[in-house]
Protein backbone atom coordinates (compact mmCIF):
# COMPACT_ATOMS: atom_id res chain seq x y z
CA UNK A 1 0.00 0.00 0.00
CA UNK A 2 1.37 3.40 -0.97
CA UNK A 3 2.03 6.07 1.64
CA UNK A 4 1.33 9.66 0.49
CA UNK A 5 4.22 12.12 0.41
CA UNK A 6 2.81 14.20 3.25
CA UNK A 7 3.13 11.15 5.53
CA UNK A 8 6.63 10.06 4.49
CA UNK A 9 8.09 11.08 7.86
CA UNK A 10 5.81 8.49 9.48
CA UNK A 11 6.55 5.77 6.92
CA UNK A 12 8.89 3.67 9.08
CA UNK A 13 6.32 3.53 11.88
CA UNK A 14 3.38 2.87 9.57
CA UNK A 15 5.25 0.09 7.79
CA UNK A 16 5.97 -1.52 11.17
CA UNK A 17 2.20 -1.79 11.79
CA UNK A 18 1.32 -3.18 8.35
CA UNK A 19 -0.76 -6.37 8.35
CA UNK A 20 -1.87 -8.48 5.36
CA UNK A 21 -5.58 -8.63 4.62
CA UNK A 22 -7.90 -10.11 2.03
CA UNK A 23 -10.32 -7.51 0.75
CA UNK A 24 -13.83 -8.78 0.05
CA UNK A 25 -16.17 -7.75 -2.73
CA UNK A 26 -19.54 -9.31 -3.49
CA UNK A 27 -21.34 -10.49 -6.60
CA UNK A 28 -25.09 -10.86 -6.21
CA UNK A 29 -25.80 -14.38 -7.44
CA UNK A 30 -26.89 -17.81 -6.28
CA UNK A 31 -24.02 -19.89 -4.92
CA UNK A 32 -22.92 -23.48 -4.67
CA UNK A 33 -22.98 -25.01 -1.16
CA UNK A 34 -19.18 -24.92 -0.74
CA UNK A 35 -18.54 -21.44 -2.15
CA UNK A 36 -17.60 -18.30 -0.24
CA UNK A 37 -20.81 -16.37 0.27
CA UNK A 38 -23.00 -13.98 2.17
CA UNK A 39 -26.40 -15.47 2.92
CA UNK A 40 -27.88 -18.31 0.93
CA UNK A 41 -27.37 -21.93 1.93
CA UNK A 42 -24.34 -22.93 3.99
CA UNK A 43 -22.47 -26.17 3.36
CA UNK A 44 -24.71 -28.79 5.02
CA UNK A 45 -24.85 -32.52 4.53
CA UNK A 46 -28.08 -32.73 6.57
CA UNK A 47 -30.49 -30.45 8.39
CA UNK A 48 -29.25 -31.89 11.69
CA UNK A 49 -25.88 -30.19 11.06
CA UNK A 50 -27.45 -26.74 11.22
CA UNK A 51 -26.33 -24.97 14.45
CA UNK A 52 -28.77 -23.91 17.14
CA UNK A 53 -28.45 -21.58 20.10
CA UNK A 54 -28.56 -22.62 23.76
CA UNK A 55 -32.37 -22.68 23.61
CA UNK A 56 -32.46 -24.97 20.58
CA UNK A 57 -33.45 -22.19 18.17
CA UNK A 58 -31.79 -22.22 14.72
CA UNK A 59 -29.18 -19.50 14.41
CA UNK A 60 -28.94 -17.04 11.52
CA UNK A 61 -26.46 -17.96 8.79
CA UNK A 62 -24.42 -14.90 7.90
CA UNK A 63 -21.44 -15.90 5.75
CA UNK A 64 -19.13 -18.68 4.64
CA UNK A 65 -15.49 -18.50 3.61
CA UNK A 66 -13.97 -21.19 1.45
CA UNK A 67 -10.32 -20.95 2.45
CA UNK A 68 -9.23 -22.64 -0.78
CA UNK A 69 -10.64 -19.61 -2.64
CA UNK A 70 -8.86 -17.08 -0.42
CA UNK A 71 -5.20 -16.02 -0.69
CA UNK A 72 -3.40 -17.59 2.30
CA UNK A 73 -2.96 -15.57 5.48
CA UNK A 74 -0.49 -16.35 8.25
CA UNK A 75 -1.98 -18.58 11.00
CA UNK A 76 -5.21 -19.17 9.04
CA UNK A 77 -6.02 -22.64 7.70
CA UNK A 78 -5.29 -22.84 3.99
CA UNK A 79 -8.07 -25.34 3.25
CA UNK A 80 -11.63 -25.95 4.37
CA UNK A 81 -14.63 -23.79 5.19
CA UNK A 82 -15.38 -21.22 7.88
CA UNK A 83 -19.06 -20.64 8.59
CA UNK A 84 -20.38 -17.67 10.57
CA UNK A 85 -23.67 -17.82 12.47
CA UNK A 86 -25.26 -15.24 14.78
CA UNK A 87 -28.26 -15.21 17.10
CA UNK A 88 -31.61 -14.87 15.35
CA UNK A 89 -33.16 -11.90 17.15
CA UNK A 90 -33.96 -8.22 16.70
CA UNK A 91 -30.46 -7.26 17.88
CA UNK A 92 -28.73 -9.47 15.28
CA UNK A 93 -27.25 -11.61 18.02
CA UNK A 94 -25.38 -8.74 19.66
CA UNK A 95 -26.08 -9.96 23.19
CA UNK A 96 -25.90 -13.70 22.48
CA UNK A 97 -23.21 -16.14 21.49
CA UNK A 98 -22.11 -16.39 17.90
CA UNK A 99 -20.87 -19.61 16.33
CA UNK A 100 -17.99 -20.07 13.90
CA UNK A 101 -17.70 -23.56 12.46
CA UNK A 102 -14.56 -24.84 10.79
CA UNK A 103 -15.04 -27.68 8.30
CA UNK A 104 -11.57 -28.98 7.42
CA UNK A 105 -12.74 -31.39 4.70
CA UNK A 106 -15.65 -30.85 2.35
CA UNK A 107 -17.05 -32.43 -0.79
CA UNK A 108 -17.97 -30.75 -4.06
CA UNK A 109 -20.99 -32.88 -4.75
CA UNK A 110 -24.19 -30.88 -4.82
CA UNK A 111 -26.31 -34.04 -4.91
CA UNK A 112 -25.01 -35.01 -1.46
CA UNK A 113 -25.67 -31.59 0.09
CA UNK A 114 -28.60 -29.37 0.99
CA UNK A 115 -29.34 -26.88 -1.77
CA UNK A 116 -31.53 -24.55 0.30
CA UNK A 117 -31.13 -23.06 3.76
CA UNK A 118 -33.70 -25.02 5.80
CA UNK A 119 -34.41 -22.10 8.16
CA UNK A 120 -33.92 -19.01 5.99
CA UNK A 121 -37.65 -18.38 5.71
CA UNK A 122 -38.35 -18.79 9.42
CA UNK A 123 -35.81 -16.36 10.88
CA UNK A 124 -37.60 -14.15 13.39
CA UNK A 125 -35.10 -11.31 13.11
CA UNK A 126 -34.36 -9.30 9.98
CA UNK A 127 -31.17 -10.35 8.23
CA UNK A 128 -28.42 -7.68 7.92
CA UNK A 129 -28.29 -8.29 4.17
CA UNK A 130 -30.93 -8.29 1.45
CA UNK A 131 -29.37 -10.51 -1.24
CA UNK A 132 -27.34 -13.69 -1.41
CA UNK A 133 -23.94 -13.10 -2.93
CA UNK A 134 -20.64 -14.69 -3.86
CA UNK A 135 -17.61 -13.46 -1.93
CA UNK A 136 -14.54 -12.52 -3.97
CA UNK A 137 -11.08 -11.96 -2.46
CA UNK A 138 -8.13 -9.74 -3.33
CA UNK A 139 -4.88 -9.56 -1.33
CA UNK A 140 -3.97 -6.22 0.21
CA UNK A 141 -2.51 -4.85 3.42
CA UNK A 142 -3.70 -2.55 6.17
CA UNK A 143 -1.96 -0.09 8.46
CA UNK A 144 -2.84 0.45 12.13
CA UNK A 145 -6.48 1.51 12.36
CA UNK A 146 -7.78 4.84 13.61
CA UNK A 147 -9.72 3.09 16.39
CA UNK A 148 -6.59 1.56 17.96
CA UNK A 149 -5.37 3.11 21.19
CA UNK A 150 -1.83 3.13 19.78
CA UNK A 151 -2.97 5.27 16.85
CA UNK A 152 -4.35 7.90 19.21
CA UNK A 153 -1.22 7.82 21.37
CA UNK A 154 1.07 8.15 18.36
CA UNK A 155 -0.72 10.85 16.39
CA UNK A 156 -3.42 12.67 18.38
CA UNK A 157 -2.34 16.31 18.88
CA UNK A 158 1.02 15.68 17.19
CA UNK A 159 0.19 16.34 13.53
CA UNK A 160 -1.04 19.26 11.48
CA UNK A 161 -4.50 19.19 9.93
CA UNK A 162 -3.31 17.95 6.52
CA UNK A 163 -1.32 15.11 8.08
CA UNK A 164 -4.22 14.13 10.32
CA UNK A 165 -6.65 14.03 7.40
CA UNK A 166 -4.18 11.96 5.34
CA UNK A 167 -3.63 9.55 8.25
CA UNK A 168 -7.36 9.07 8.67
CA UNK A 169 -7.82 8.40 4.96
CA UNK A 170 -4.97 5.89 4.98
CA UNK A 171 -5.80 4.11 8.25
CA UNK A 172 -9.61 4.22 8.36
CA UNK A 173 -10.41 0.51 8.14
CA UNK A 174 -13.64 0.60 6.16
CA UNK A 175 -14.74 -2.23 3.89
CA UNK A 176 -15.21 -5.97 4.20
CA UNK A 177 -12.16 -8.19 4.65
CA UNK A 178 -10.35 -10.98 6.50
CA UNK A 179 -7.23 -10.13 8.51
CA UNK A 180 -5.86 -6.60 8.81
CA UNK A 181 -7.30 -4.12 11.31
CA UNK A 182 -10.97 -3.54 12.18
CA UNK A 183 -13.23 -0.54 11.92
CA UNK A 184 -15.22 0.36 15.02
CA UNK A 185 -18.02 2.79 14.30
CA UNK A 186 -18.15 3.74 17.99
CA UNK A 187 -15.29 2.36 20.10
CA UNK A 188 -13.06 -0.69 20.38
CA UNK A 189 -14.39 -3.42 22.70
CA UNK A 190 -12.20 -4.11 25.74
CA UNK A 191 -11.25 -7.57 24.50
CA UNK A 192 -9.71 -6.04 21.35
CA UNK A 193 -8.21 -3.03 23.08
CA UNK A 194 -6.31 -5.20 25.55
CA UNK A 195 -5.09 -7.58 22.84
CA UNK A 196 -6.99 -10.66 24.04
CA UNK A 197 -8.74 -11.15 20.70
CA UNK A 198 -6.24 -9.75 18.24
CA UNK A 199 -7.15 -11.26 14.86
CA UNK A 200 -9.97 -10.23 12.53
CA UNK A 201 -11.64 -13.39 11.26
CA UNK A 202 -14.17 -11.39 9.29
CA UNK A 203 -15.39 -7.83 8.93
CA UNK A 204 -18.57 -7.07 6.98
CA UNK A 205 -19.20 -3.42 6.16
CA UNK A 206 -22.01 -1.57 4.42
CA UNK A 207 -22.23 -2.32 0.70
CA UNK A 208 -24.87 -2.28 -2.03
CA UNK A 209 -24.44 -5.53 -3.98
CA UNK A 210 -25.80 -7.73 -1.17
CA UNK A 211 -27.37 -4.85 0.75
CA UNK A 212 -25.25 -5.37 3.84
CA UNK A 213 -25.87 -3.03 6.77
CA UNK A 214 -25.88 -3.52 10.51
CA UNK A 215 -28.26 -1.10 12.20
CA UNK A 216 -27.86 2.48 11.00
CA UNK A 217 -24.85 2.40 8.62
CA UNK A 218 -23.01 -0.07 10.84
CA UNK A 219 -20.66 -3.01 10.39
CA UNK A 220 -19.80 -6.25 12.17
CA UNK A 221 -16.61 -8.01 13.26
CA UNK A 222 -15.60 -11.48 14.36
CA UNK A 223 -12.41 -11.74 16.44
CA UNK A 224 -10.24 -14.62 17.59
CA UNK A 225 -6.95 -14.87 19.48
CA UNK A 226 -3.88 -15.81 17.45
CA UNK A 227 -3.34 -18.81 19.74
CA UNK A 228 -6.82 -20.21 19.14
CA UNK A 229 -6.51 -19.56 15.41
CA UNK A 230 -3.24 -21.50 15.25
CA UNK A 231 -4.84 -24.32 17.23
CA UNK A 232 -7.88 -24.34 14.90
CA UNK A 233 -10.06 -23.72 17.96
CA UNK A 234 -13.04 -21.64 16.88
CA UNK A 235 -15.04 -22.10 20.08
CA UNK A 236 -13.78 -18.80 21.52
CA UNK A 237 -14.79 -16.14 19.01
CA UNK A 238 -16.07 -12.66 19.84
CA UNK A 239 -18.70 -11.03 17.63
CA UNK A 240 -19.62 -7.37 17.69
CA UNK A 241 -21.53 -4.92 15.57
CA UNK A 242 -21.79 -1.18 15.94
CA UNK A 243 -23.66 1.56 14.13
CA UNK A 244 -23.95 5.34 14.09
Image: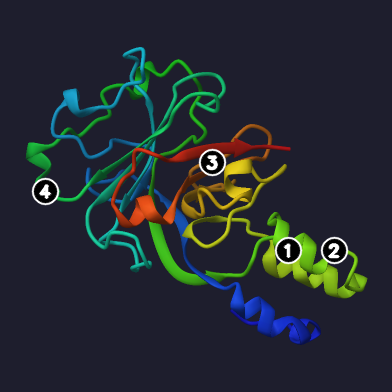
> Residue visible at 78% across and 60% down?
152
Task: Looking at the image, tell me whether mark 4 or mark 1 is earlier in sequence order.
Answer: 4
Measured as percent of width and height from the top left, residue 37 is found at 35, 47
Badge 4 vs badge 1, beta-carbon distance below 8 Å: no
Measured as percent of width and height from the top left, residue 204 is found at 52, 47
* Left or right: 25 as drawn, with respect to 31: right
Kindly report which numbered mark, 3 or 4, lies closer to the viewer in this rendering: 4
Residue 107: mark: 4
* Label 4 Cα crowd, 10 Å radius (few <14 / some 14-19 / many 20+): few
> Residue visible at 29% across and 61% down?
69
Q: How is the image coloured?
A: rainbow
Badge 2 vs badge 4, beta-carbon distance below 8 Å: no
Task: Looking at the image, tell me whether mark 3 or mark 4 is earlier in sequence order.
Answer: 4
Separation of residues labelled 3 and 1 (CA atoms): 28 Å
Q: Is 115 or 196 nearer to us in this picture?
A: 196
Task: Looking at the image, tell me whether mark 3 or mark 1 is earlier in sequence order.
Answer: 1
Badge 3 vs badge 1, beta-carbon distance below 8 Å: no
- Residue hosting label 2: 156
Task: Looking at the image, tell me whether mark 2 or mark 1 is earlier in sequence order.
Answer: 1
Badge 2 vs badge 1, beta-carbon distance below 8 Å: yes
> Residue visible at 12% across and 50% down?
108
The part of the image, by quadrant, that contains residue 78 is bottom left
Which secondary structure lies at badge 4?
Answer: loop
* Left or right: 198 as drawn, with respect to 9: left
Separation of residues labelled 3 and 2 (CA atoms): 32 Å
Residue 100: mark: none
- Residue hosting label 1: 151
Amino acid sequence: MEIPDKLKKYEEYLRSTEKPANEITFTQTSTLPWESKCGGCPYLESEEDYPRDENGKPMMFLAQINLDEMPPLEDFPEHGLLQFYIGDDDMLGLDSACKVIYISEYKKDASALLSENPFENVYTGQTPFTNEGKINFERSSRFICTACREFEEKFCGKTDDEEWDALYELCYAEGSFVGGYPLFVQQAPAYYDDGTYDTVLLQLDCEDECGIMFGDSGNCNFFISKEDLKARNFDNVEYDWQCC
